[in-house]
Amino acid sequence: MEQGKNKERKMESKKAVSEAQKRASRKWDAANKEKKDKSRTKSGCKKYINTYATLEDLEEVRLWIKDRENILKNN
């Protein structure tokens, strides 16, 4: 019985997001779509590099970075 109460308390603390907060989050997401997408993509890139990339993968990423740097420098 005690285990059930603890589980119930945990669930209550996790779902305590007000409707106003949900609306504010949706509004921010809509107004900052590009910023949110950039952040999510950057995070995914970092996870890929730190978790999955082999030495060959890292070399390929270095080439992409060099290419992008050249594009940005020439514009």
Image (spheres, grey):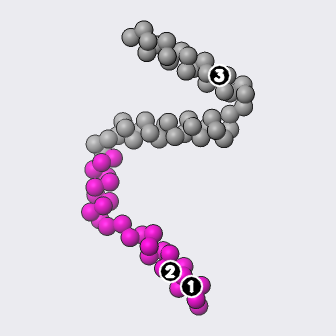
Residue 26 among magenta residues: yes
Residue extent of the magenta highlight: 1-29
Placement of 35 over or under 68, stated as above or below: below
Residue at 50%, 36% (x, y): give it.
Answer: 42
* Crowding at mark 1 (Cα within 10 Å: few <14, some 14-19, many 20+): few
CB atoms of marks 2 and 1 within 8 Å: yes
What separation in Å lies between label 2 and label 3 (alpha carbons)?
49 Å
Residue 38 coordinates in the image, percent (x, y): 43, 35
Amino acid identity at mark 3: Glu
Q: Quadrant of residue 33?
A: top left
Element marked by disc 3:
helix
How many numbered markers are drawn? 3
Element marked by disc 1:
helix
Element marked by disc 2:
helix
Residue 17 coordinates in the image, percent (x, y): 36, 66
Amino acid identity at mark 2: Glu
Residue bearing mark 3: 60
Amino acid identity at mark 1: Gly
The circle drawn on residue 8 is 2
Residue at 54%, 39% (x, y): give it.
Answer: 44
The circle drawn on residue 53 is none
Q: Give the residue at the far right of this rendering.
A: 55
Placement of 34 over or under 14, stated as above or below: above
What separation in Å lies between label 1 and label 3 (alpha carbons)?
51 Å
Q: Is residue 17 left or right of residue 68?
A: left
Q: Quadrant of residue 1?
A: bottom right
The circle drawn on residue 4 is 1
Residue 34 coordinates in the image, percent (x, y): 36, 36
Residue at 30%, 61% (x, y): give it.
Answer: 21
CB atoms of marks 2 and 3 within 8 Å: no
